[in-house]
Image (cartoon, grey):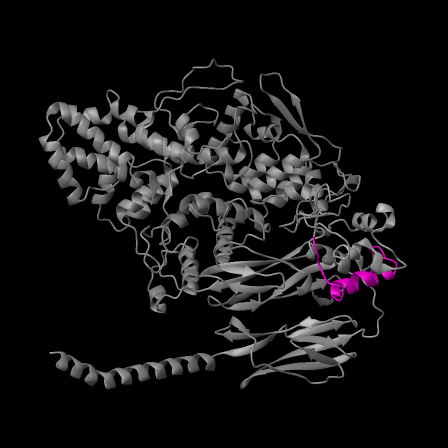
Amino acid sequence: MLEDAGASRQDACPTFRLLWSLGLLFHAISQSNALAGESVVLLPQEITLNGPTSFHQLIVERVLDGAFVGQLTNDLAWVSSDTRVVRIDGSTAVPVANGEAKITVRSGDRSAEAQVNVANIAKPVEWSFRNNVQPILAKTGCSSGACHGAAAGQNGFRLSLRGYDDEGDHLSLTRHAFGRRIIFSDPGRSLMLLKPTGAVPHKGGKRFETDSLEYRILSEWIAAGAPPPKQNEPRIDRIEILPAAVRLKPGTTQQLIVQARFTDGHLEDVTRWVKYTDANSSVTQVDETGNVKVMGYGEGAITAWYLSRIAIATVTVPYENAVGPEVFARATKRNFIDELVLEKLQSLNLPPSPRASDAEFLRRAFLNTIGVLPTAQEARDFLASSFSTKRDELIESLLRRPEFADYWAYKWSDLLLVNSDRLRLAAMWSYYNWIHHNVAANTPWDVMVRRIITAKGSTLENGAANFYVLHEDPPAMAETTTQAFLGMSINCARCHNHPMEKWTNDEYFGMANLFARVRAKTGAADGERLIFAATSGDLNQPRRGRPQLPRPLDGQPLPIDSSEDRREHVANWLVSPDNPYFSRAIANRVWANFFGVGLVQPVDDLRVTNPASNEKLLSAAARFLAENKFDLKALMRAILQSETYQRSSQALPENAADTRFYSHYYPRRLIAEVLLDAYSQVTGVPTEFVTDLRNANRGLGDKYPFGFRAIQLPDTRIASYFLKSFGRPDREKTCECERTSEPTMAQALHIANGDTINQKLAAKGNRLEKLLADKTPPEKIIEEAYLGALCRFPTEAEESKLLNVLKVANEKDQRVVVEDLYWALLSSKEFLFNH
């Protein structure tokens, strides 16, 4: 038999070799076809070299199907059409004389060209403090928050953070410390050069060498008399990053180039001076030179920062899944959401999971839309229905239910910080009732926000006016307005230019000055404040000692002597369809409610350095809202109807690693209030809420009406160990971070043996007792429990095991068995999570 086996193996060898050879041939042909479809391009394709010290780095990029797919670095042949105009040093263009030339690069039989224009070659070198010195101080870390850019500076030497204050920094360098930081007659003896080169002890260590370009620029600037920033010199307008989007494979690298465009129109290569950061280090990592290394699959974003300007490069790294285009072509598309999600999934090679079951969809839609579970009968009826339109009909019914207003009023009360620690009881109720009324009336979001921003009069009669009781000074009003309604924090810009955003200290105080005339006085009733706008008054900017023109971020300023209510100007700008921040912020908040993960995460962190996981989709959702006059229900309906929302939470092997692109639904734990209400509903035992309002007119111990749900509470100051343990926010600051969903030991112990579940299961007259008192058959008890808690029927295996226990239990033990059944369901992951 061994001989036969050996013979068979020998006979198989020629066949194996043939298949292996054919495989190699097929692979080679495939690679050849891929290369044949590729082209190369030289980036940038047009270059202006302005002055004798200018230079420009070049990269050769492969292009396939209209997309950049990686950099070529080996076997490149560079040619200048006129070396008397421009020469090539490695991969850098260096000017020689004024004129025009072409740079050509060849890689095998492929080539690419760039047009070069050289100007002002004979212009005397004049280094600018603002445009040359400050970028060096920022890049080398001298003006960073960990060094001299800290609020208190270091060792008596303070610079503005990343160089936002040119005049102040110039004064600090040239006039303070008895002039020892700069020695005009002998620049090399200046502390500004001795310390960063390590010639004298420096806690910050060596930052550059004496033969570096940094040293040359600083020493020549000092030798020229360290000229201050000039008012008429060109200023930075914007920066551009190349390539702005690229598709790469794990393990590959990509060099980025950053160009700065100045107000006089000229471009400079500032790649060397840019500060780089990566937004997703598990996908991409970038070094200080702008070289990106791919670490894993997904999508990474590289941020380039230069002179308070920011640009983003997106790196897409498709998963190595064998997914054909037909998978995405035949996938169901209900609306724009599905189109754009599938487009993103296809770019990443992530197949979508199949559709969720009716039971999964039913439970998910109820919890996300109105914050309650369907009753057992509602679940039974929905699962029994054979109508093809039943999901759409369910969506419409949920959007009309009264619980919708309770749930979304609670969410907006979180956002608007309704709490009785900072408002008297009557004012708190006035604010909450105002929010609830507007949600119930389906007031468009832009109208609702406008009413808040322009609110005036009595805080007891106009609940929206309490916004100005909670936020009493102009900076707080400006910060809360941008955080709550634009999803961005400008707080850092209160002291210095924002290090992660484009907002400057000047822009911050322009925005804050719009609220400088808001006034409040005490009303006649307890807790009443009267809000009004004065006709004069401004907020001084501490750094400049004078007010900034009242101006919304990216908006037009108001005349400083205008007597109109400046808040009207804020509101007009804020809710304008032309304001991209407003519609994006609310679209992202609504999206996150239904999916558990925002298109931008964290939900209220929509800074430019934190890009969306699907920028096209967020922009489309924002446009959709604006086109539908900010009717939030219109966007909710589109989300609920989408196949993206209705996908199963069961991941496929090919998409299990996806946590950002919605290839499947992401399970998440129910929020504290919804979870507590679910326990009450399933057991039939409402939770008793006792007021604990320290500034209330009611006495401690007063109770809310019987059956009041946690999601109906107007205030988070209601004492509840359960709600506190499961992450209820304090409503102290406008930040999604206040609500926590992280599991804790306290939560696990409370579910296992705490009072909340156990007391409801043991309570007299609860659902369990009624089922037993009505002599409900064991099969129906089990069915009722599963439908009520999990919105599904038990499986045959589950029902069989439970029946074996229930049928043998005597009348006395049946209560214990049913309690155990409910406890097992209510403490299960399937119950605790929305999936």
Magenta stretch: residue 657 in it?
no
Is 9 on the left or on the right of 644, as rendered? left
Q: Which residues are magenta?
A: 205-230
The quarter in which the C terminus is drawn is top left
In the rendered image, which quarter contains the N terminus?
A: bottom left
Toward the viewer: 293 or 46? 293
Q: Nearer the viewer, residue 317 or 150?
A: 150
Q: Position of residue 218 (x, y in %)?
A: 79, 60
Furthest-right residue in view?
A: 185
Residue in front for this viewpoint, 212 or 494: 212
* 435 with respect to 222 (left or right): left
Whether residue 205 is situated above or below residue 384 in the rendered picture: below
Which quadrant of the view contains residue 704?
A: top left
Where 427 sits versus 48, above or below? above
Position in image of residue 293 (x %, y %):
53, 64
Instruction: Give x and y (percent) for residue 329.
Output: 35, 66
Picture quadrant where residue 205 is located: bottom right
* Vertical placement of residue 762 versus 827, above or below: above
